[in-house]
Image (cartoon, rainbow, N blue to C red):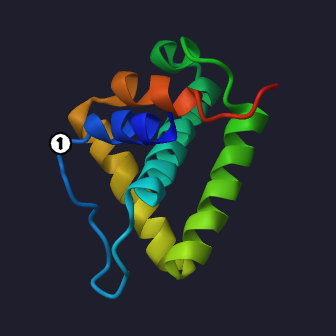
Amino acid sequence: MIRTLLAMALAASPVATLAQDAAAPPLNLEQRMLLRCSAAFALVAGGQERGEAQALRWPAMGERGREFFVRAAAQVMDQAHLDRDQLAAALQAEADDITASGTLDQVMPPCLALLPEE
């Protein structure tokens, strides 16, 4: 199930590789999915704060989205041995890709399945 969700979350990305700092180690599929979903949740949360109609169609990202973001970021930093700058660059690259490719609607459904229950 998790592998399917991972693949679905990344399938919306037309870019097969994550833009990373040259010194950053490569990320595995699970780590990329965690960052991609974190970026998607952050984009939706920001849109919800601004009252954007597209973002308001999704469940409120407030506490659950923030908790996922923090835990996922810590997990990826620990597992991949990233520093804060590398993590920030990886998250920004995912957010930029989602925005540029217009794939938020495709990324969100599998990512929502990863959120803890309310």
In the figure, 24 relative to 52: above or below? below
User: Disc 1 on helix, strand or loop?
Assistant: loop
Name the residue at 27% across, 34% down: 12
> Is 97 in front, or is 108?
108
Left or right of 71, for residue 52: left
Most distant residue in the right direction = 118
Left or right of 96, for residue 64: right
Q: Quadrant of residue 115?
A: top right
Q: Quadrant of residue 116?
A: top right
From the top left corner, tell me how far across and down residue 65 is, in percent.
67, 38
In the figure, 17 relative to 69: above or below? below
Classify mark 1: residues with Cα within 10 Å, few (<14), some (14-19) or many (20+). Answer: few
Most distant residue in the bottom direction = 23
In the figure, 70 relative to 84: above or below? above
How many numbered marks have been drawn onto this rendered protein structure? 1
Name the residue at 39% across, 47% down: 95
Residue bearing the label numbered 1: 14
Q: Amino acid at mark 1?
A: Pro
Residue 82 seen in the figure: no
From the top left corner, tell me how far across and down residue 42 is, in percent.
56, 42
From the top left corner, tell me how far across and down residue 69 is, in percent.
64, 50
Residue 41 seen in the figure: yes
In the figure, 113 relative to 83: above or below? above
Name the residue at 63% across, 65% down: 75
Give the quarter of the figure containing the C terminus: top right
Q: Quadrant of residue 4?
A: top left
From the top left corner, tell me how far across and down residue 15 is, in percent.
18, 50
